[in-house]
Structures are given as structure tokens and as C-alpha cells.
Image (tube, rainbow, N blue to C red):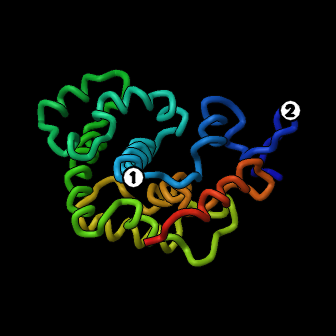
Amino acid sequence: MGNVTTDDNGVTRCAWAAREPETTYHDTEWGYPLDGDNAFFERVSLEGFQAGLSWRTILTKRENFRTAFAGFDIEKVARFTDADVTRLLGDAGIVRHRGKIEAVINNARHAADLIDAEGSLPGYFWRYEPAAEPEPHSQTTSPESLALSKDLKKRGWRFVGPTTMYALMQASGIVNDHAHECVTRAAVTQARSSVARR
């Protein structure tokens, strides 16, 4: 039971979600399938920003990120210029890391190309769903996340290493990494069952 925690109301969750804002994120978003290209782009971007930091840091700055990056609208971010990079480096509401900021802009441009080539970001990313669901909390990378990372890098994407891509797969429902005892696991399983794999 080391991977879960039970609150004062007797609700059992994944252990990392014992306090806010992680609890609400865990209960309402983590593991649920994402809808649409911009939603996937936002999550890829935030997972990239999280590299080397805590997810709590990203969650507390999430609305600032959305404002700074035009709601993670792929077409808008793809048009960002050097002036936007300078603006973002001066924005104390986000993580001011030049490499990560430039990666988001770069990835927006390559996301547009990927959508043109593959149809949609959800359709592309779901192709990396593992054939057999892994045991929850048992790994930080997978053969699928390694393959996804390799393909994205070949397409010119940045800050999409295999650990970051496995975190994306967990967050977007491509794998259900909620503990078996977790209150949210069944709801995520149900939500995943209705995804159109294409």
C-alpha cells in the first residue's frame, strides 16, 4: 500500500496526490484522455517544463503558463518570435528557462507539421499505447515512451525525452497508472474505453 494514501474521509488515492493542488488534479485530470490537439500540446509543454522540477511547481503556475503561451494555441505559439522569448524570460509567473521556452515555440511549429502528416496529435500519441497495461507506479519509462521520444526528436521536437513522454502517457490516459486501490482508477478505465484509437 506504499503507493497510496487514505485521507480523513477514508478516500484512497495515489500517494503523490495527498494534498492540494495535486489532489484535485489527480481526481479530475490525471489519466483521463485529453481532447484535441491544443490539449495535447499544452500537456507536452507542461511536462517539458516540469523536467527537473516538482509537478506542484507547474500546477501552481499553470494559469500563468496558459496566459503566457496564448492558451497553448498551437497556431498562435508557432508564430512567437524572439521578442516573445524575451517577454517570457521576464515573466516571473512561469518557469523562466530559455531552453524550455524555446522548445515550446519550436514544438508548436513541429506540431503543425505533425498534424498535417498524421491527422491529429491525439491520434498520433495514442498509437504508442502499450499492448499490455503496465503495473501502476512500476516504471518511469517504457519501450513505447522510448519509441515516442525517438520519433518526436526525429521530427524536430525538443524536451521530449523518454521519461517526460512516459509522464505524458500517464497524464493523458495512454496508460492508466492509478494504483489498483485508487478511487480514480475505475473512472479512468471507463474514460479510456471510449477513446477512438486511430
Taking depth in this image into account, of 24 and 152 the one nearest to the observer is 24
Query: Mark 1 or mark 2: which is in front?
Result: 1
Name the spot of residue 94 as percent of width and height, x first: 37, 28
Q: Is residue 22 left or right of residue 169?
A: right
Mark number, residue 36: 1
Marks 1 and 2 in Cβ contact (< 8 Å): no
Q: Is residue 33 left or right of residue 74?
A: right
Callout 2 crowding tier (Cα within 10 Å): few <14, some 14–19, many ≥20: few
Query: Going 21% across and 40% down the picture, which residue do you hit?
Result: 76
Query: Going 41% across and 43% down the picture, which residue do you hit?
Result: 46
Q: Quadrant of residue 186?
A: bottom right
Q: Which residue is mark 2?
A: 9
Name the spot of residue 131 as percent of width and height, x first: 57, 78
For numbered disc 2, what is the local secondary structure?
Answer: loop
Q: Is residue 60 left or right of residue 186?
A: left
Q: Is residue 155 above or below residue 19?
A: below
Mark 1–mark 2 distance (CA, rounded to whole Å): 35 Å
Give the amino acid type for the residue marked by disc 1 in the picture: Gly
Callout 1 crowding tier (Cα within 10 Å): few <14, some 14–19, many ≥20: few
